[in-house]
Image: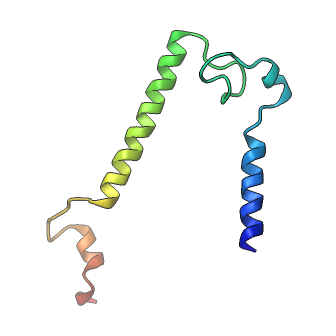
Amino acid sequence: MKKISATIVFLAASVSMYACPVCERAKAKTAFGSISHGPGPGTTLDYIAVWVSIAAVLLTLIFTIKFLVKPNEKNSDHIKNSILNFEQS
């Protein structure tokens, strides 16, 4: 059952990586042309917006992982201690 589920997921992912025929013909010859739906970014402002968005997503991912792994909350009255302190229950 797990093999069938994994196969379905991988097949769905591989099919979604191909562009539709209209977009394939109009695909831009740029860095983002192969992954965008349509002509892709055309002006310098478009590239700035794309790179700022990529940087924001990467920073969010980095800080999310950082604070999930080591939250640095040392106060004894922090809300997490009410959940983690099993002796009171």
Assign the C terminus to one quadrant of the image: bottom left
Q: Nearer the viewer, residue 51 or 2?
A: 2
**Vertical position of residue 13 compared to residue 27: above or below:** below
User: Horizontally, is 33 left or right of 53 in the view?
Assistant: right
The image quarter in which residue 27 lies: top right
Where is residue 25 shown, x and y percent of the image? Answer: 82, 19
Q: Nearer the viewer, residue 84 or 65?
A: 65
**Vertical position of residue 9 compared to residue 20: above or below:** below
User: Horizontally, is 6 left or right of 57 in the view?
Assistant: right
Q: Residue at x 77, y 59 (%)?
A: 8
Q: Residue at x 42, y 32 (%)?
A: 55
Where is residue 50 shown, x and y percent of the image? Answer: 51, 24
User: Horizontally, is 85 left or right of 32 in the view?
Assistant: left
User: Horizontally, is 69 left or right of 27 in the view?
Assistant: left
Q: Residue at x 20, y 62 (%)?
A: 73
**Vertical position of residue 83 compared to residue 73: above or below:** below
Assign the N terminus to one quadrant of the image: bottom right
Q: How is the image coloured?
A: rainbow
- Looking at this view, name the residue that lies furthest to the top: 43
Where is residue 24 shown, x and y percent of the image? Answer: 79, 24
Q: Residue at x 37, y 39 (%)?
A: 59
**Vertical position of residue 47 compared to residue 34: above or below:** above
- Looking at this view, name the residue that lies furthest to the left: 75
- Looking at this view, name the residue that lies furthest to the right: 21
Q: Nearer the viewer, residue 82 or 34?
A: 34
Question: What count of labels does the image hold?
Answer: 0
